Image (cartoon, rainbow, N blue to C red):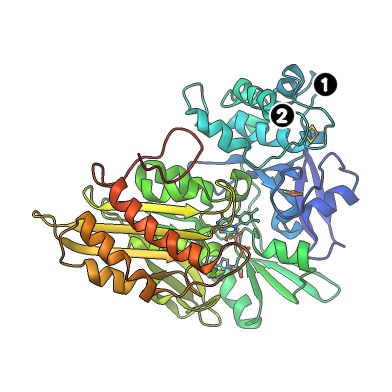
Amino acid sequence: MIRFTLNGRPVAVDQAAPTTTLLDWLRASGHTGTKEGCAEGDCGACCVAVRDEGAPGGARWRAENSCLVLLPQLEGRTLVTVEGLATAEGLHPAQQAMVDTLGSQCGYCTPGFVMSLFEATYREDLGKDAASWRLDDQLAGNLCRCTGYRPIREAAERVAGTRPDDAFKAALSEEAPRPAVLSHETDGERFLSPTSLAELWPMLAEHPDATLVAGATDLGLQVTKRHGRWPVVIGLERIGALRRLEATEESVLIGAGVRLSDLEEWAHEGLPMLARQLRYFAARSIKNRATVGGNLVNASPIGDLAPVLLALGATVLMSSVEGEREIPLDDFFVAYRQTALQPGEILAAVAVPLPDHDTRLGAYKVSKRRELDISAVAAGMAVRTDAIGRVTEVRLAYGGMAATPARALLTEQALMGEPWTAENVQRAAAFLDHDFTPIDDHRSSAWYRATVARNLLLGFFDETRENPLAPLRAGHTGTLEVG
Ligand SMILES: Cc1cc2nc3c(=O)[nH]c(=O)nc-3n(C[C@H](O)[C@H](O)[C@H](O)COP(=O)(O)OP(=O)(O)OC[C@H]3O[C@@H](n4cnc5c(N)ncnc54)[C@H](O)[C@@H]3O)c2cc1C
Ligand code: FES
Ligand code: FES
């Protein structure tokens, strides 16, 4: 039995298959205000708001794509859909703003936009002084094909960060129900949801072949696009220990379950190179669920975090009933979509040494569309030089160039100990052709990938001549700007 609160009312579901998406369940149970557009996290028509009690700094409302949430992942949660916003006093400010700015025409996208605006309403970091790109970022996961975005953006300006003293704000201070293990089974399919590592280990011992799921932004696609079904799924998202985000002067420990929107928020100040990459990593509603662990364990050659973390010299902590072991991230990706995780082991955290202020740093993502697209090539670069400008440390990591994210070791070697000059960087860039033999596919040709990889290195040199980490422009556009 899955229990949660929907629009202020308790709900108990016992007959849904564990892979039922929240969107399908909502619509089948009459909550048809929430729409389906793409069923793959791209359009935002299905956005709902979920109270996230595990967020750093206290509970928050999160706009999430219900097409990629599995119903059992709602166990113990509080959920609001567009039907739950208006009260006897009138529309919610997010709805009223859409009415006042004429932000809706056919209305298909409107419930999704309203739920993103709902999240924006209660965000503490979206007050009047918030940078303008943050509003674009808030809405980036919602598509509208008829109204045009100007009025919708104006609605966002009216409500973002206003935090009215209403029941939704009060709900953020209410205590969440004490989490309890969920074991939900129908027709031979089971979803287990432990709330601690201690509860997880016996489940893994009993079901060594269980499929793990965190945010489900990858796994959910297998359900919606490939009718994926599994005998046993174990959800990791309620394990608090996996959401640690602990920084010291020297390093940061990022729990595998840390959601990318939380990581991005911390990284603006804590590790701007990472924030730079996360700006172009999917839309906020995806980042509200996607986790660091999910991104690394899916081991996609075009996953966007790996190149940056490889360049920073990260290590991964893997955990099992037997304890923890730590290996460099360089050794984690063993083959195409395969990692060093052993049966019974999970990724627990990533430890990242924080670079000092004069390390030159770059993070790049190149895709067909500038925003919210899958990378053709991604790169993370870190270079240190000594007092006379010779390279003493260099890590150049690429995604999209090989079967796994990988470092350009020969190119690094060609730079090591040499003066960091345009001529030397140009000369070393030729070694990228020996480091990688990229493939042709529908995203780009091998020639394009090889050319982009070289140009990113040259661009990195240019971009970091004056400033070790070029700041991103205030606008929500391109990662790489060359003067
Ligand atoms: C619309 C859309 C846009 C996207 N954009 C990008 C993008 O720009 N860049 C990019 O890199 N990716 C992107 N992705 C892919 C995806 O969002 C990320 O890879 C995300 O970080 C996956 O995290 P998750 O928690 O949702 O993973 P899940 O789907 O929950 O899990 C993914 C895999 O990791 C395993 N897993 C998860 N956590 C652990 C753990 N702690 N230990 C062991 N195994 C674990 C699961 O078993 C599963 O095999 C996008 C996806 C969508 C739907
Ligand atoms: S239906 Fe398009 S994002 Fe969910
Ligand atoms: S109002 Fe028609 S899709 Fe947005």
Q: Residue at x 53, y 46 (%)?
A: 261
Where residue 258 sits: x, y (%)? 51, 55
Q: Give the distance between the C-alpha atoms of the residues marked 1 and 2, in whole angstroms.
A: 31 Å
Residue 148, labelled with which disc? 2
Answer yes or no: do the residues labelled 1 and 2 have beta carbons within 8 Å?
no
Q: For this view, does 156 lie left or right of residue 83?
A: left
> Residue at point 66% right, 74% down?
211
Q: Where residue 292 sits in the image (x, y, percent)?
A: 50, 59
Reading the image, the residue beneath label 1 is: 88
Residue type (three-letter) at the residue carrying disc 1: Ala
In the rendered image, residue 450, in percent from the top left (x then y), is placed at 44, 66
Q: Would residue 477 be visible to someone looking at this image? A: yes
Q: Toward the viewer: 380 or 366?
A: 366
Q: Earlier in the sequence, mark 1 or mark 2?
A: 1
Beta carbon at label 2 within 8 Å of ligand 3: no
Specify whether 95 is left or right of 407.
right
The image position of residue 235, as x and y in percent, is: 64, 65
Please rate how many residues cluster around mark 2, counting C-alpha atoms within 10 Å: few if below 14, some from 14 to 19, many from 20: few
